[in-house]
Amino acid sequence: MTGLDLEAERLLRDLAPQVLGAVIRRYRDFAASEDAVQEALIAAAQQWPRDGVPDNPRGWLIQVAARRMVDHVRSESARRQREHAAALDLGQVVAAASVESRRDEDETLTLLFMCCHPALTNSSAVALTLRAVGGLTTAQIASAFLVPEATMAQRISRAKQAIRASGVPFDPPEARVRAERLETVLHVLYLIFNEGYTASTGPTLQRLDLAAEAIRLARAVRQLMPDAPEVTGLLALMLLTHARRDARTGPAGELVPLPQQDRSRWDRAGIDEGIALLTAALSQGRVGPYQLQAAVAAVHDEAARHEDTDWPQIAALYGLLERMSDNPMVALNRAIAVAMVQGPAAGLALVDALAAGGRLAGSHRLDAVRGHLLELAGDRDAAVTAYLAAANRTTNIAERHYLLTRAASLRERGKP
């Protein structure tokens, strides 16, 4: 945002979903509210560098967005009664803005559950929440779902229309409804964190702001639902994975793979908290996919060196995960673990089976894993081909640079 310092930019990113949640709850129109909040953010980016950040930035944004909503309502209908209601509502919003800014209820968390609306399918709810709460672009969401951008744009548009047409109250859900929507909410947070851990597009490997926001929301959900072990498992998974963030890139932002990472740079406090949370979740006796993934992350984090990694345990955990969830990325990760235990040929056989199934068609990760396993097997030419195919498919510049570097290094070693 041109003209804003980094602190103000971060403030706007943090406030955007909170303001959107407040405006939607009042006007019940997702699409129009999103447009109004975007206009308010643009106004802030233009005015705050000149006038300074207001004392109540959240209230300021709500007030500006509310005015935009009134303009929208007036343009939609010339009926005086509707205009009067909208104008009255504006007064209520402006009067309540300072009060709402002091409310304990987290509007971002409220918006998160609101987006998991009963009028939507799970996939539509996930896409809409990534857009509204996570701030991801349509292209980034499409990449997370492995679908074309146009398809995802239509899905998000239909989701907004379905919410508006459903007539179901768009309010913070009761405890029973929260439990019903929890699976979708956790999947949303998982995808937001993954986008932060490895950005689907752009020049940098990581988007630490997104990863941190996913962790913050997971903490809030756990505070709301402390007896749900999968909530605790997801938070543990995030912390155990995020603990490696400083070691994942080099001085120039280049990708550093796990075997080459300086483990002294890992966040030990984050690892300790993650392991404690995982232990607490597993003790409840209801093991789910997020707890198993957290267990995999814990095995990696507890190894003092890459050579000390307990790969048989990781392979066994992925085997359990694969039986529990029909996720091709789990199968791909299991192929790596199997290769580390039984040799690259065994892993390549699993990768070939995945490729034949077609569910990861077009994904650069399939080719990247194939390249890695072919390199371990000593087939340099085939590894180079796979690395180049992966580089051509990824839209993350740091990943592409790493893959091209691997290919170039193998070619150089292969010269007589």
Image (tube, rainbow, N blue to C red):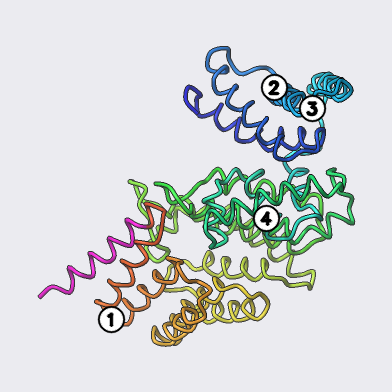
Image position of 404 with respect to 67: above or below? below
Check the image and report above or below for 105 versus 57: below
**First in sequence: mark 3 or mark 2?**
2
Which residue matches tag 1? 378
- Residue at 67 percent of width and 66 percent of height: 290
Q: Amino acid at mark 3?
A: Ser
Say which of marks 4 and 1 sits in front: 4
Q: Which of the image's four quarters has the C terminus? A: bottom left
Residue type at the position of mark 4: Val
Q: Which mark is residue 86?
A: none
Query: Along the polypeptide, which appears first: circle 4 or circle 1?
Result: 4
Structural distance between the alpha carbons of marks 4 and 1: 41 Å
| Crowd rating for badge 3 (residues with CA inside 10 Å; few <14, some 14–19, many 20+) | few
x, y percent for residue 228: 80, 61
In space, the residues marked 2 and 4 are separated at their CA atoms by 28 Å
Q: Residue furthest front?
A: 78
- Residue interval drawn in magenta: 400-416
**Name of the residue lying farthest toward the top:** 51
Mark 2 or mark 1, which has the lower sequence index?
2
Q: Which mark, residue 77?
A: 3
In the rendered structure, the answer to whether residue 13 lies left or right of residue 82 reads left
Q: Main secondary structure of the magenta part?
A: helix
Q: Which residue is mark 4?
A: 126
Secondary element under disc 3, as helix, strand or loop, is: loop
Along the polypeptide, which appears first: circle 3 or circle 1? 3
The kind of residue tagged 1 is Gly
Q: Residue at x 68, y 25 (%)?
A: 61
